Amino acid sequence: MTVDPQVRQQLVQYRQSIDNIDAALVHMLAERFRCTKAVGVLKATHELPPADPAREEYQIERLRTLAKDANLDPDFAEKFLNFIIREVIRHHEAIAADFSGANHTPA
């Protein structure tokens, strides 16, 4: 099948934009997890629970509103945030376990 060179070029341009966006998403997620790691350390240091259901509920509603405003499916946005929240909680639990084990280690 022969593809018009202009169509092929447009496809390449779209894909370059998608690749750039994917790279930005990875960097943004890395920064987000850097911050949530710091939150996990702070929580563990002060013996706060890894999860904060009120904060999570607020964030989900906030993201759903942002998604609607951006013409993005709010259900998709919620699923995406829930995945991230589960991962953050898992990290916070691991950090808390590390702190707990460190506090019980004989000197």
Image (cartoon, grey):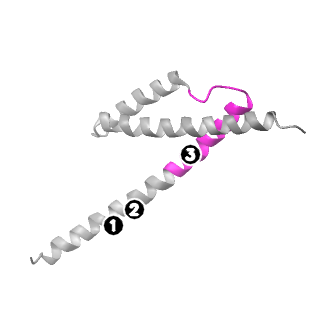
Image quadrant holding the C terminus, namely top right
Give the label, 3 or 1, closer to the camera. 3
The residue pinned by badge 2 equals: 20
Report if residue 50 lies within the magenta region: yes
Instruction: Give the image quarter of residue 90.
Output: top right
Q: Is residue 107 above or below residue 3?
A: above
> Is residue 50 depicted above or below 83 in this figure?
above
| Left or right of residue 30, residue 102 in this image | right
Task: Point out which mark residue 33 bears.
Answer: 3
Q: Which residue is mark 1?
A: 16
* Quadrant of the image occupied by residue 73: top left
| Position of residue 68 in the picture relative to residue 10 (left or right) | right
Q: Nearer the viewer, residue 84 or 8?
A: 84
Q: Is residue 16 left or right of residue 29?
A: left
Question: Which residue is found at the position 19% from the left and 73% from the top?
Answer: 8
In the figure, 8 relative to 66: above or below?
Answer: below
